[in-house]
Structures are given as structure tokens and as C-alpha cells.
Image: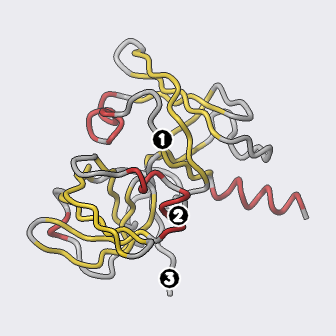
Amino acid sequence: MYSPMFTGIIESVGQVVSVTSSGANRIFEIKSSISEELKTDQSLSHNGVCLTVTKVSGGCHFVTAVDETLKKSNLGNLVPLDPVNLERAMLSNGRFDGHIVQGHVDQTAICTKISEADGSWEMDFEYKDTSEGLVVEKGSITVDGISLTCYNVSDTGFTVAIIPYTFENTNFGQLKVGDMVNLEFDIIGKYVKQLVSV
């Protein structure tokens, strides 16, 4: 079984149509411009979380998030009409426009500040101190599935600059201070950290 890879370049912003509980899991029905092109068993990133498409019907697709995913990401907070960043797994012959993204959320963060910056936006995020140095100045990070470069890095936070295209074509256009986002740290940094810790 292969492990899908993403690049953090959002293809479409879907909208949650319905959320149904199934035991400890939740089934999400999502409408998007790419839903009709999907197929059952296909891997798809939702706000940076890799989920398997279980059904495609009426311009919508369905995915199931297990309890562990709901607890460790912001998917547990989704309600109808919420926007969701979507990206299909990278094709083996595709261009590598972002960075290596696995679709495995490491932890969540809270947006603490949004400010306009002469035609773009700066957004500050705070997260739990990992004391692992996985967020580095001018390094890559994935926020809600979006490949971004971080700066003003501290042990518990960082800033990203958002250009108008990203603001208008991802869920960042609706992001508010206090909102929770999903973080995936750079996989190369995680491997390096593991190697130097041995």
C-alpha cells in the first residue's frame, strides 16, 4: 500500500454540506469544484488531513474521519457551510510546486493576529511548545494544507505572509483571530531531528 504525497498547493476550496456521526467517527459530505472528478478510495487532503473518499454523488464527495483524527485536527470543529482546503495526491509525473506534505497533522495552532501588509496579509499563529526546533526561520510549514514559509519564529509561534491569490483561493479568506488551524511540520526537518537524536 503506497502512502500518498501532497505538495501544499490547494486545488479547490470545498464547502461542508453535512456532518453525520457514526459511532466515534464523523462522515463529512463536501461540495467542491473537483468532487465530481473524484473516485472512491482516492486520497484527498482536507485542511491538510489525508482522508479517503468513500462516495461521490450529486456534485459532492464523502469522507470519514476517525476519532483520533477529530481529536488531533480542526476537522472536529467543522459544521455545514464551513470552507475546507482540498488537494488531490500528487501525480508521480507532476510538478513539485510546494514542499513534501504527507497529510498527517502534527498538532493544531491558534491564529492570534491578522494584519494587512500593503497588498498582502500577515498572520500570526501560536502552538504548543514542542522544544524540538521543527519550525525554523524561512522554513516550510503546512497550515491547513497550505505550503507556506514561516518567519518571526519562536518556540511557540510563527508568522506567515499571505498573498492575495492564496487569501482568495483558500480558507484563509475567512480565517479569523481565535480560529484553530492544522499544522504539519516539514518531514525533512523531522527526519533530521530523529537522526541527530540517535
Gap in angstroms between the C-alphas marked 3 and 1: 30 Å
- Viewer-nearest of discs 3 and 1: 1
Give the SS element for disc 3.
loop
- Name the residue carrying label 3: 2
Number of numbered labels in the structure image = 3
Q: Is residue 180 above or below residue 50?
A: above
Gap in angstroms between the C-alphas marked 1 and 2: 20 Å
- Name the residue carrying label 1: 180
What's under tag 2, amino acid-wise? Answer: Gln
Q: Residue at x 45, y 61 (%)?
A: 49
Gap in angstroms between the C-alphas marked 2 and 3: 12 Å
Looking at the image, is mark 1 or mark 2 earlier in the sequence?
Answer: 2
Residue 190 in percent (x, y) is at 71, 57
Is residue 20 found left or right of 8 in the rendered image?
A: left
What's under tag 3, amino acid-wise? Answer: Tyr
Q: Which mark is residue 102?
A: 2
Residue 137 visible in the shown view: yes
Q: Which one is in front, 173 or 176? A: 176
Outermost residue on the bottom side: it is 1
Outermost residue on the left side: it is 58
Residue 131 in percent (x, y) is at 80, 43
Q: Residue at x 67, y 57 (%)?
A: 188
Location of residue 96 (image quadrant): bottom left
Residue 46 in percent (x, y) is at 37, 58
